[in-house]
């Protein structure tokens, strides 16, 4: 492993070929999964570049699109998504993941933070306008 028991966390690099989606789900129907992934990426790209009214959402959408495309490229080249980062967090073995998965995660996390921030800002404005 790269490190063990650092504040209860272990980290190692392990090669895992994932033929399914997250946590290996849908691995029994890889062609359907690939088609759905491509469809979602195309729909998200069309939305991001042609429909998206909030330009600040472009960056997180791009992170998601790039991560998803990288995983699809893995499927075309290797027949599966290549995962390698493995953490054991205080005894819980977290599923192995890759850099593309991190891009998707951070894109979604940024979107969630933007939405929460907008909601809090709107709530503050509404609170100051109410008698």
Image (spheres, rainbow, N blue to C red):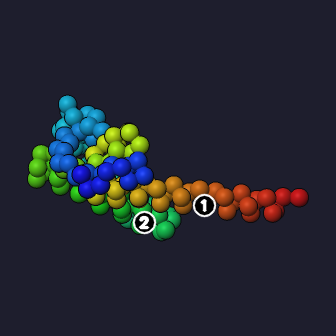
- At horizontal 30% and vertical 39% (from top left) the residue drawn is 23
Specify the quadrant of the image occupied by residue 102: bottom left
Dot placed on the residue nearer the N-terminal end, 2 or 1: 2
Q: Residue furthest right?
A: 131
Q: Is residue 85 visible?
A: no
- At horizontal 38% and vertical 39% (from top left) the residue drawn is 91
In the rendered image, residue 34, in percent from the top left (x then y), is placed at 22, 43
Drawn side of residue 109 relative to residue 130, left or right: left
Callout 2: SS: helix
**CA neighbours of label 2 inside 10 A, class few (<14), some (14 to 19), many (20+):** some
Drawn side of residue 118 relative to residue 18, left or right: right
Query: How far, Cα to Cα, is label 2 from label 1?
Result: 16 Å
- At horizontal 36% and vertical 49% (from top left) the residue drawn is 5
In the rendered image, residue 57, in percent from the top left (x then y), is placed at 47, 64
Residue in the foreground of this view, choosing between 42 and 77: 77
Q: Which mark is residue 117?
A: 1
In the rendered image, residue 128, in percent from the top left (x then y), is placed at 81, 63
In the rendered image, residue 71, in percent from the top left (x then y), is placed at 23, 52
- Quadrant in the picture for the C terminus: bottom right
Specify the quadrant of the image occupied by residue 44: bottom left
Residue in the foreground of this view, choosing between 101 and 68: 101
Residue in the foreground of this view, choosing between 104 and 50: 104
Specify the quadrant of the image occupied by residue 98: bottom left
Q: Is residue 122 visible?
A: yes
Callout 1: SS: helix
Q: Which mark is residue 58?
A: 2
């Amino acid at each position: 492993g790269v490190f063990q028991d650092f504040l209860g966390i272990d980290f190692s690099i392990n090669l895992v070929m994932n033929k399914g989606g997250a946590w290996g789900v849908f691995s029994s129907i890889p062609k359907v999964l690939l088609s759905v992934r491509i469809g979602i990426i195309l729909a998200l790209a069309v939305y991001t570049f042609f429909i998206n009214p909030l330009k600040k959402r472009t960056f997180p959408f791009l992170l998601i699109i790039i991560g998803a495309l990288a995983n699809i490229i893995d499927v075309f080249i290797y027949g599966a998504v290549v995962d390698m980062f493995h953490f054991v967090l205080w005894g819980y073995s977290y599923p192995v993941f890759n850099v593309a998965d991190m891009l998707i995660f951070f894109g979604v996390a940024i979107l969630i933070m933007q939405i929460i921030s907008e909601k809090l800002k709107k709530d503050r404005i509404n609170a100051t306008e109410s008698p």
